[in-house]
Image (cartoon, coloured by chain):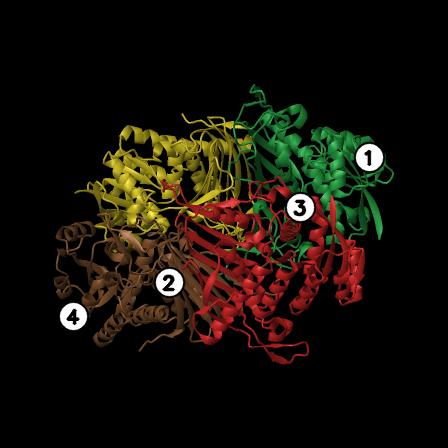
Chain colours: A red, B brown, C yellow, D green
Amino acid sequence: MNEIGIGVIGTGYMGACHAQAMAAVGHVFEPPLRPRLVAVADVDARSAEAARARFDFARATDDWHELVADPDVAVVSITAPNILHKPMALAALAAGKHVWCEKPMALTAADAREMRDAARAAGVTTLVGYNYVRSPALALARKLVEEGELGRITQFRAIFDEDYMGRADFPYGWRVQRKLAGSGVLGDMGSHAINLAHFLVGPIGEVAAGTYTAHAERADEKGRMLPVENEDVIEALVRFETGVVGHIGASRIAFGRKNGLDLELYGTKGGLRFTQERFNELQLFKTAERSDDNGFRTILTGPPHPPFGRFTPGWGHGLGFNDLKVIEAAHLLDAIAGRSRAWPDFEEGARVEAVCDAIETSVTERRWTRVHTT
Amino acid sequence: MNEIGIGVIGTGYMGACHAQAMAAVGHVFEPPLRPRLVAVADVDARSAEAARARFDFARATDDWHELVADPDVAVVSITAPNILHKPMALAALAAGKHVWCEKPMALTAADAREMRDAARAAGVTTLVGYNYVRSPALALARKLVEEGELGRITQFRAIFDEDYMGRADFPYGWRVQRKLAGSGVLGDMGSHAINLAHFLVGPIGEVAAGTYTAHAERADEKGRMLPVENEDVIEALVRFETGVVGHIGASRIAFGRKNGLDLELYGTKGGLRFTQERFNELQLFKTAERSDDNGFRTILTGPPHPPFGRFTPGWGHGLGFNDLKVIEAAHLLDAIAGRSRAWPDFEEGARVEAVCDAIETSVTERRWTRVHTT
Amino acid sequence: MNEIGIGVIGTGYMGACHAQAMAAVGHVFEPPLRPRLVAVADVDARSAEAARARFDFARATDDWHELVADPDVAVVSITAPNILHKPMALAALAAGKHVWCEKPMALTAADAREMRDAARAAGVTTLVGYNYVRSPALALARKLVEEGELGRITQFRAIFDEDYMGRADFPYGWRVQRKLAGSGVLGDMGSHAINLAHFLVGPIGEVAAGTYTAHAERADEKGRMLPVENEDVIEALVRFETGVVGHIGASRIAFGRKNGLDLELYGTKGGLRFTQERFNELQLFKTAERSDDNGFRTILTGPPHPPFGRFTPGWGHGLGFNDLKVIEAAHLLDAIAGRSRAWPDFEEGARVEAVCDAIETSVTERRWTRVHTT
Amino acid sequence: MNEIGIGVIGTGYMGACHAQAMAAVGHVFEPPLRPRLVAVADVDARSAEAARARFDFARATDDWHELVADPDVAVVSITAPNILHKPMALAALAAGKHVWCEKPMALTAADAREMRDAARAAGVTTLVGYNYVRSPALALARKLVEEGELGRITQFRAIFDEDYMGRADFPYGWRVQRKLAGSGVLGDMGSHAINLAHFLVGPIGEVAAGTYTAHAERADEKGRMLPVENEDVIEALVRFETGVVGHIGASRIAFGRKNGLDLELYGTKGGLRFTQERFNELQLFKTAERSDDNGFRTILTGPPHPPFGRFTPGWGHGLGFNDLKVIEAAHLLDAIAGRSRAWPDFEEGARVEAVCDAIETSVTERRWTRVHTT
């Protein structure tokens, strides 16, 4: 079996997630290329060394340029702070490496387009970490849509609510600073919902939106109250190119929600409902001749829902969040080997950023706003 | 006990509902005024007579003017087609009757204002049939908000989805004609969600919206395809006077949903979730010191949730839709007797129509639009 | 339309429930006989008079014998304390009255048999108030079983859990005294589950059981600790005549459960799940060729599920507990008029008591015990 | 870091699961001993070699005795057919190896006792693969019980239903033969429920049970109908040493259930409900002063529920079934290093088999039967 060298930049949660996924993917799938963990980089040398030891990387470095330049590294995972995604990706692409970049891909639509153009020029495989669409349940949703089981799509809603910044005493930090984070919950979570809309319905043509910041100031570690520069809540209307109108919302202050990416999708023959908090399930309604025994079906995912069976033959036994990253890694390796096309790639990542950009323009201009994807 | 004479115009489902409620309210509650079923009117004399016999009204008529003029009738229930609400209400108010009018109150905001002004002038009690807010679960929601259990409100979403016009072969009729129905799903169902927003959060200052008509034509009984003149789906953003941004959506083609008035409400201390399809339950999340044992609580309504205990001492035994009409009737009788203030009255009904009006303007003008409530 | 005179003994919750149901049934259904509220009896004369006024009975009495002897009374509702069911029923049957008796029918199987025999001899209509089986959802369950949609039945479980005696300080009273209440949770709630087993599967041949009393003593109003004489929890195995083994359990101390009559039923082609706390829903699984889109369907009841449509055309709008009593009243009137056969009648009521009796014998003898239904 | 050599017998699903878990545990946890994958054995040499390559074992063999004798192997995982557990475990224990044995531990209680005695004599660490109790949600359940949050335990029920043998055409094979499988669904699935009862409540003193075989014959691959020798459904009552009565049931023919290990547990202060199909959630009811805002809480597991945080800091992001095996592996390594005590070990495994044995005796003798654990 052919091996392929992996380099991971960043050793936080997502860095660990990428490393674990690359270590596990050969055990779960039979990938065409077997990952070899070559290098891990972190600006803090001790973190880099700890991650090296934990995941059995061959080497560690505190200089990501070194990792990018490493001839043994063929795939670069970018899990560093969002503001660094662009320089890292451009460097990796310039070096001809495949790139697996965490979301959001960039802080602005212009940056995303630049990265997308660089990827086109490099001719390599890229993947943006919108991992939720890779679950067996959402893969089934996509399949049902493609098979026409729902008929023509007529309605779409998706929200993504969590409560990690619900408390007024959540400290001031990079997340609330425009320069470091760009938008607030829109980029961090709303972007997943936009990607999901693209996945199940298709391109969004225009948007209208409004935002709310519940906590106008937050205290830094010294207790100073500093202004919050981006939104806690975003509510947006979307108009798909098909004419269908939909809703996308997101919040980082919705107490009680922990992974609340909730979907509603309807067509002329049926409907789907889903929540990421129970992502091993899909709710499906199909119209039928007989009306008295019909209702939403709670589909528990299992071997009939690829790639569930790769993990366990036990229907209903459930995958976990980290398994979604393993699926993503397998998808990336398949694409690099030419077996399939990676998605969401930098093309899609840039499209998501274009929608985010239009949403922010709409908030300012207070009107329906066209999405520019050129 | 004092009696009060009731007249009901209309003998369809809502007419029956009003009559049953007035017949039952004395058995369930101890109202200050005991209803006496005096007269029922329907343009079809045989329907009127059948309803008279079924509900023990004293008399039947095919002329609603006669009912309004009847000196024994003190309360007029208006359950005739929406287009007739205005002339009937104006006549009843002019005659000094109390009015219980089904929703939507009117086809346009201007008409609603005219009815509201007439009610102000008449000085009687009015009530609009937005009955969902009268359930014990939503009464509890309101109480929790008022007590500050959720803190300051920061987020609101409500949708109202059903599927009664989901099938492409649902026939052409009054519902899809602007002249007879006004807007489509907005007035029929979206108005409930707007009323709920007012009930739990307060006045809406501005809106932005989009609509979709999935079935551009429908066949009449002769098979002729005729154009549908109003929307199947409405999605709207709302900005409350407090600055909070929210979402309201409605659909009459959402396959599988039967009574899908779903609510999400968050504040700085907790959150609420609710669906009318399980309206005997309320989901509540309260922040707490201890984090490992917390989650949304599924509150089953019972005697601690007035007026549940009027119906049964059996906690969790459940009320039905028709019981909500009994609660509404009791509320109306209390107000007429001066024990409380009726809500949603014609003031509120006109406010709901003003929001609907702004939503329709926004759809046309494609921008955030101010709600005019003067 | 023919009228029929109604007499109700007892003015507690169930007395009110019977009176309301008889008052409402003509408005909701088109019964072959229209009830006239003739007489109400309560040992406390003031309660009797208050009920008379509230429900418009023609007369009130503090002597139930008088009510039974009243020639205008054709149907006697028995809602007095359980220990009085037998003498009242025997008197009513002797007078040739139809009898609607609350459950449990009697305190012992021997008493129940005596009442059944009297009913046989009288040749009138009897009905025992196991009202849950009359809901549209459970009627659908029965229909699906009869149509063979589940195949041959292979598995049954039903529990009935509530928490009304969960607190250790719930006071000592008639409920915990053998002489007044007979068994504890078995007769009060387990009997519903047994009736449900009969309704959906058929006769139970033998049982094995165990009980637990969590609170061995409870304090009376003077604070004296007195021994609890019956069980808080019953767990029983049942063997149907078909050979299928099942489970029936009940508890009055299951904190958080309010109306927890939960059902699981499986056959060679599918399965059903149900809880009374959401009795407007039924969960149905049907085997199918296609496996990837299957799961339990949450059926919301509506007009396709008789008699739901009698109450409202609004699918998913929901019935309430009191509506179940209206259905029961309509069922009784149909049977009296000869349109159908009343069930659960005194035959079935005696069968339920026979199963309870066998369960109590099994607890004592610690072995599988045959049900004696002679 | 100290390494420890792992040998895995069996390359089916559970073999893969053990291998993956040992490969991943060092990435997720910081175990005191780092596993080294030394050897894999399968009676089919090609399967052994394929597993070696897939998981990077140092060597493969078709002779499990060789693996057991390998001086580099310190831990032996036994995932071969159940009938082989005993000879393999005895050999491994005789060689002084630690043993991780899949469930059920043995086909009879006598065999289990023999294995337990060998483990006592060897003084090594043993673990039986009842992995469900290791989930963060059930760990929380145990913690709540230990802290007294539920008060004194008064009620327990657990079922384990699946539908893998629901279809009449599921082929005849080892699963239905007494000699090869022992009991039917009791050993395969009921044993998990028994282990769960021990985990949350404590020792079971006596049992009463009944079984049902829905499909008396099944066809082998040549279409011959052969008799099924064990049960499809088991229903058992259990009496804990505390006196509490409970219920345990299991089925392999419950259509629609895929991983239906459902728990109900009540005490004098609250209650718990759980289903393995949603094992990232726990339902908790706690009694409280305020009654109108109380109900079962749906606790989503997250970092406050160890060891969830080892996998992801993302509350509500969910673990998968395979993650439970990683937790189990970490638990085993901790115990080997002396940091904790392994559970469920061979002591507990033998206790589970003793309960199964008593249940089978009860079925035959048709009476409450004492559990013999000597």
Report in which chain the residue with disc 3 lies. D
Circle 3 residue: D322
Q: Which structural element holds mark 2?
A: strand
What's the CA distance linking mark 3 and mark 2?
Answer: 45 Å
Q: Is residue C118 left or right of residue C292?
A: left
Report in which chain the residue with disc 1 lies. D
- Tell us which disc is closer to us: 2 or 4: 2
Residue C23 visible from this viewpoint? yes
- Tell us which disc is closer to us: 4 or 3: 3
Would you call the spot at circle 3 few (<14 residues within 10 Å), some (14-19), or many (20 or more)?
many
Residue furthest top as drawn: D224
Residue type of the residue flagged with mark 2: Thr
Q: Quadrant of the N terminus of chain A?
A: top right
What's the CA distance linking mark 2 and mark 4?
Answer: 40 Å
Circle 1 residue: D67
Q: Which structural element holds mark 4?
A: loop
Circle 4 residue: B95
Marks 3 and 2 on same chain: no
Residue type of the residue flagged with mark 3: Asn
